[in-house]
Image (spheres, grey):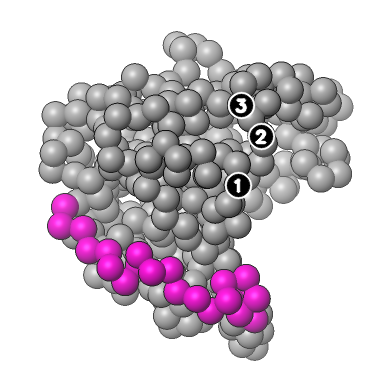
Amino acid sequence: MRNFLDNLLTILKVFYLSAFKSISWVAKSSLKNKLLILGNGPSIKESLDSIIDLKEEFEVLAVNKFAISDEFHLIKPRFYFLLDGDFFQFDESILNDAAEHPRVKKKPEFIAVQDEINKTWISLLNCSWDLTLFVPQIYQHSFLINKARNAGLNIRVFNYTVLKGSDSLVYYLFRRGLGLPQCQNVINAAIGIGLLLKPKQIWLTGLDHSFHLGLEVDEHNQVWEKVTHFYSSEGKYFKHPLVNQKTGARVTLKEVFSNLWKVHESYDKIRMLSDRSQINIFNATQGGFVDAFERRPIK
C-alpha cells in the first residue's frame, strides 16, 4: 500500500515538476572512462597525490566549493556539480560583497559561507578549460547561470524531482532523467548524475560523512556543528548552531540523526540504481562513514 501511494505521488510530481520531459543529454551520454567523484571531506588530502598522478585514467567530477582549492587548477575536472540553492539565489551585488547578503544581518557568521560561495563562482567563471556544469532545472535561468553561459561554461540541467516508490518505477523514471532518489547531500545527487553519464565505473573519494563527530549540545540544548573540509586551513573549522532556516527554531538531535538516516537510505537507493544500470561504484575514501559501496584503494 505504501509503495502504491509513493508511486502515485511520484508520477504526479513528475508530471507537475518535470513535465514528463526527459533531459536530452541523458540519452546521448556514454563515458568511455571511469568517473571519479571528489567529495570535500578532509580525508581526500590522503588521496590527492594519487588523484593527480592518475587523473588521465578518469573523468573527474567535483562538487560545491572544490573550485576554491589549488587542486581545482591541478586536476582540472571535466564536470562540476552544484545542488544547494545557496549557490544560485543571489545577485551581482552579493557576488561582489558577501556582506550584502540579507542573511548576514541575522546570522553574521554566514558571511564566511557566502564568501566561499563567491570565491567558488569566481574560480568557475575564470577556469581555462572545457568545463561542464550541472545545475538543477529550477535555477537554469538564474543570474549566475546566465553569467556562467556567457563565460563559456557548458550548462547541463537536471530534474531534481524526488522519486519514491517501487524500485522498478524509480529506475524507469531515473534513467530517463525525470528525477533522482531523495538526496540529503550533494554527493547523493552527484552519484545519481554520474550514473546517468553512463561511465564504465564510478569511484568515490572524500566521503568522510563524519558530521556526527562534530556535534555539540550547549546548556540551552542548542545543537552546534563543527564543519571542516579538505580545503580548510589546518585546524580551522566553521562552527554554527543548527536551526530551521524557515522557522528559526533549533534543530533537535532527533532531527539531525533522522537526516543522517536519510543520507544513508539514499546511498542504498543509489546502489540499487547502479546495480540495475550495471555500473560498479567503488569507495576509495580512506576511513569515513559510508558502507553502501565496495571499498577499493584508488591506486
- Name which of mark 3 and mark 1 comes first in the sequence: 3
Mark 2–mark 3 contact, CB under 8 Å? Answer: yes
Q: Nearer the viewer, residue 3 or 136?
A: 136
Residue located 51% across and 38% down the image: 147
> Disc 2 versus disc 3: distance between alpha carbons?
6 Å
- Name which of mark 1 and mark 2 comes first in the sequence: 2
Q: Amino acid at mark 2?
A: Asp
Q: Is any atom of residue 41 visible in this view?
A: no
- Tell me: residue 65, above or below residue 199: above
Q: Nearer the viewer, residue 223 or 193?
A: 193
Percent x, y of residue 102: 79, 29
Q: Look at the numbered disc 2 and give the secondary structure of its residue.
A: loop
Residue located 55% across and 35% down the image: 211
Count the labels in the image: 3
Mark 3–mark 1 contact, CB under 8 Å? Answer: no
> Disc 1 versus disc 2: distance between alpha carbons?
9 Å
Residue 142 badge = 1
Question: Which residue occupies the extreme front position in the image?
Answer: 150
Percent x, y of residue 65: 47, 31
Q: Look at the numbered disc 1 and give the secondary structure of its residue.
A: loop
Q: Amino acid at mark 3?
A: Leu
> Disc 3 versus disc 1: distance between alpha carbons?
13 Å
Q: Look at the numbered disc 3 and give the secondary structure of its residue.
A: helix
| Residue 19 painted magenta | yes
Q: Amino acid at mark 1?
A: Ser
Residue 95 badge = 3
Is 70 placed left or right of 31 in the picture? right
Residue 91 badge = 2
Is 91 placed left or right of 70 in the picture? right
* Magenta segment: 12-33
